[in-house]
Image: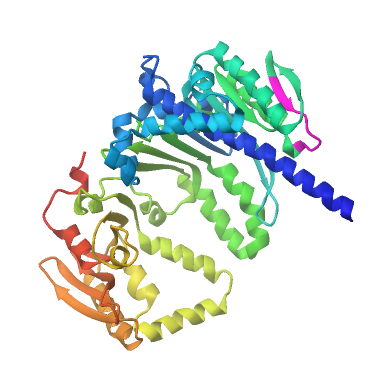
Amino acid sequence: MDEQLIETTGVSNHRTRNIIILTGVGIGLILAIAAVILLDPFGLNLLGRGMEIPAQAMPPEVVFYLGMDLRNLQSEDLDPIVWAFSEDLKQDQVSAIDRMNEELDKLFEDGLGMSFTEDVMPWVGGAIGFGLTDLEMDRYGGPEEVEFILAFEVRDKGAADEFLMKFKDRVAEESGEGFSEETYQAVTIHILDTQYEYEQIAFCRSDGLILFGQYESAFKGAIDAQSGESLADTLNFREVIGSLPPDRIVTMFINGEKYFNTFSDTFSWLYGTDLSDLYSETAGMMLDIAMGLSVADVGIRMDMAYKLDPEAISEETLEGFAVGESRTAQILPETTLLHIYSHRLDLVWQSMIDAISAMEDADFEESMEMFELTFGFDINDDLFAKLDGEWAFALMPSSAGFLSEFLEVPIGFSLLAETSDPDGLLEVSEAFSSNAELQGLGEVEKSQDEWGTYFDLLDMYSGTVIFTYGVGDDLFVIGSSKDVLQSIFSDRPSLSESE
């Protein structure tokens, strides 16, 4: 019994050490690439080169892909964003890149006894890619088998080879294990020799990419993709990625069919046949999903693109993915920090209700009835069913409300939802106000202006606004304070007018 305990502990520590090594190296290399590209110490002007180079080493059937192209991130764009979260750096006007350089040198020296400046900068390019080449889940929703490839662009093959040999020696020294070599299509794969397969660390340079991973099969798939068909070559990938802004720094791609199929058995086992059928119906609509992050003015912009199966989606649901100019972007102030919008919150809510109803949960039905008795309106028919247009969630600077006063966070929030029945939602707001006071949730103050009617729910002891809600300009709105909502409707430059 004691021997088994000792062996298990040793395996756990050994595995943890290897995972830490691989994770540390991956993070270090990602940061290294950022510093090299942003500083451009060799004057190579890398900003005009291709975007999805690592995707050329991903098999076409990859489940998930995440790419980073830091050539599109300039130092002058990065500093205001970093300074927004670091008062010290802002006060001292310290460049985010300079600080990152210092941290990278320390990280490489402490973790590997290597130099970021001397060992990484001479070879590293600007593109990074991570792909799940195989993913199998057990019925409990845990990963049963995972294969991945982490790819780094190389701009100097000789310097990259020197780095890998030095890295190999350091890992062997840290782990106490040796390396074996496997040659595939003239590419030498270095594999850490361990007793257990799941502890493996492997890497190689295949043409213009350095690849990291665990399993030999994943490397062979990546090498085959480089010389044959890759994810970057597939029509589905090109179509959905092509809908994203070309200046993005982060790209995410999900193969909808493979991803949802991976979890279908788990979903069926956990939630039963009825809910599993609803899951399959929903999953069948979504063929591929892509997301991009880019720097826009002083902030981060997120764009999403979907490829839908027209034969598996209803016209009503299709409205939820409608594209076009956002009305809420024309309303929100240009100082808005975060803006996420979509359409038909009524349909989203109804899908959730259908899913829960399929579970035949009597407690849920009882809770809905109790809510109506408590607050005086049906949350399904009187509220969500009338939120039938565009909806959005936004964050903006604010010094009023609970978040600012008690949590000392100078940010406010707002939820806006278009409605075809503003009078009905005003009645809902009135009903909630009356019953909130009866239930002791707080005091309610009502106010009106040229744009709409607002209700402040106040803490009974401090008088601080907990949140504000109301109706204005055919919108149902909830915000962290009345100041936030009034700033939305006031005359000033809007978010859509911001560069």
Q: Is residue 196 magenta?
A: yes
What colour scheme does the image use?
Answer: rainbow
Foreground pick, 109 / 410:
109
Q: Residue at x 68, y 13 (%)?
A: 186
Query: On the picture, is 359 further left or further right than 245?
Result: right
Residue 387 x/y as whole percent = 32, 65
Foreground pick, 350 / 472:
472
Q: Please give the range of residues in magenta.
A: 189-197
Q: Residue at x 79, y 38 (%)?
A: 196
Quarter of the image for residue 385 reads: bottom left
Q: Residue at x 48, y 47 (%)?
A: 311
Query: On the picture, is 26 further left or further right than 241?
Result: right
Residue most extreme to the top = 158
- Residue 393 seen in render: yes
Q: Is residue 173 above or below residue 162?
A: below
Q: Is residue 338 magenta?
A: no
Number of numbered discs present? Answer: 0
Residue 70 x/y as whole percent = 41, 29
Image quarter where the C terminus lies is top left
Residue 436 x/y as whole percent = 32, 82
Image quarter where the N terminus lies is bottom right
Query: On the picture, is 58 further left or further right than 398?
Result: right
Foreground pick, 395 / 111:
111
- Residue 234 seen in render: no
Query: On the picture, is 179 further left or further right than 334?
Result: right
Q: Is residue 250 above or below residue 144?
A: above
Residue 156 x/y as whole percent = 51, 13
